[in-house]
């Protein structure tokens, strides 16, 4: 037996690996009908071919298992390297997130305080606005009789100026005025 050729997925062909030789002990009874594996010359060529194929299959299976394990180990190493690179970044982001949460909480408290203050200012503004309207109405009420009386005086004055001497109302005042009679009570008695 010359050896087994193993095909790897990455390589086209690999050099032939010689099969280990099984020591032939004639005192041992091999499997089956008394024919041993070590007696290659005495074996049936079909059986010998099956045994060799079985050995090749077993060797290929072991190689595939070793390649799969090596591939998994390489994957684990790559993931561990990625974790080693990513972990500090995650820590930094977590710290930054904690700082942002604290800042957000502080800003919410400030916003609450400012909104309360704004509500107070709005209520104060409304109260002052009501007071202003009340004072404006009071001022208008106080000014309106003065304005009415001054307008009435001005109107009557213009009417007096517009009256001519020929008007009958004007002549009533001009002329002889009746003299009132005053009687002394002492004189009569």
Image: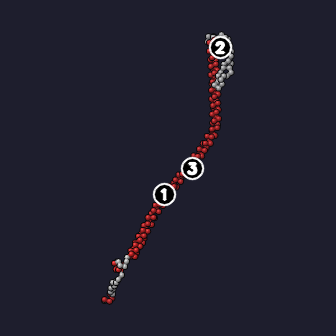
Query: Furthest-left residue in view?
Result: 189
Specify the label residue 45 is tagged with.
none
Question: Where in the figure is residue 60, as x and y percent of width and height?
Answer: 63, 21
Question: Where in the figure is residue 181, as x and y percent of width and height?
Answer: 32, 85
Mark 3 vs 1, N-terminal side: 3
Q: Residue at x 39, y 75 (%)?
A: 162
| Residue at image mark 1 | 123
Question: Where in the figure is residue 112, as x and y percent of width and height?
Answer: 53, 51
Q: Residue at x 34, y 80 (%)?
A: 172
Q: Nearer the viewer, residue 189 or 78?
A: 78
Instruction: Find the distance from the CA under tag 3 to the CA under tag 1.
Output: 26 Å
| Residue at image mark 2 | 37
Q: Residue at x 62, y 42 (%)?
A: 92
Mark 1 and mark 3 in contact (Cβ < 8 Å)?
A: no
The quarter holding residue 82 reads top right
Secondary structure at numbered mark 1: helix
Q: Nearer the viewer, mark 3 or mark 1?
A: 1
- Local crowd size for mark 3, using a 10 Å CA cut-off: few (<14), some (14–19), many (≥20): few
For the C terminus, the quadrant is bottom left
Instruction: Find the distance from the CA under tag 1 to the CA under tag 2.
Output: 106 Å
């Amino acid at each position: 037996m010359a050896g087994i050729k193993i095909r790897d997925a990455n390589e086209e062909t690999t050099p032939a690996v010689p099969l280990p030789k099984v020591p032939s002990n004639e005192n041992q009874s091999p499997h089956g009908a008394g024919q041993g594996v070590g007696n290659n010359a005495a074996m049936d060529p079909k059986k010998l071919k099956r045994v060799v194929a079985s050995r090749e299959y077993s060797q290929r299976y072991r190689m595939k298992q070793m390649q799969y394990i090596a591939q998994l180990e390489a994957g684990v190493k790559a993931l561990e390297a990625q974790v080693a690179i990513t972990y500090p970044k995650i820590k930094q982001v977590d710290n930054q997130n904690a700082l942002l949460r604290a800042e957000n909480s502080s800003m919410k408290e400030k916003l609450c305080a400012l909104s309360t203050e704004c509500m107070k200012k709005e209520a104060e503004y409304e109260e002052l606005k009501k007071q202003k309207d009340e004072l404006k109405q009071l001022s208008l009420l106080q000014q309106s009789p003065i304005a009415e009386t001054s307008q009435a005086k001005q109107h009557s004055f213009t009417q007096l100026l517009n009256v001519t001497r020929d008007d009958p109302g004007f002549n009533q005042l001009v002329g002889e005025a009746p003299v009132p009679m005053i009687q002394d009570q002492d004189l009569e008695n």
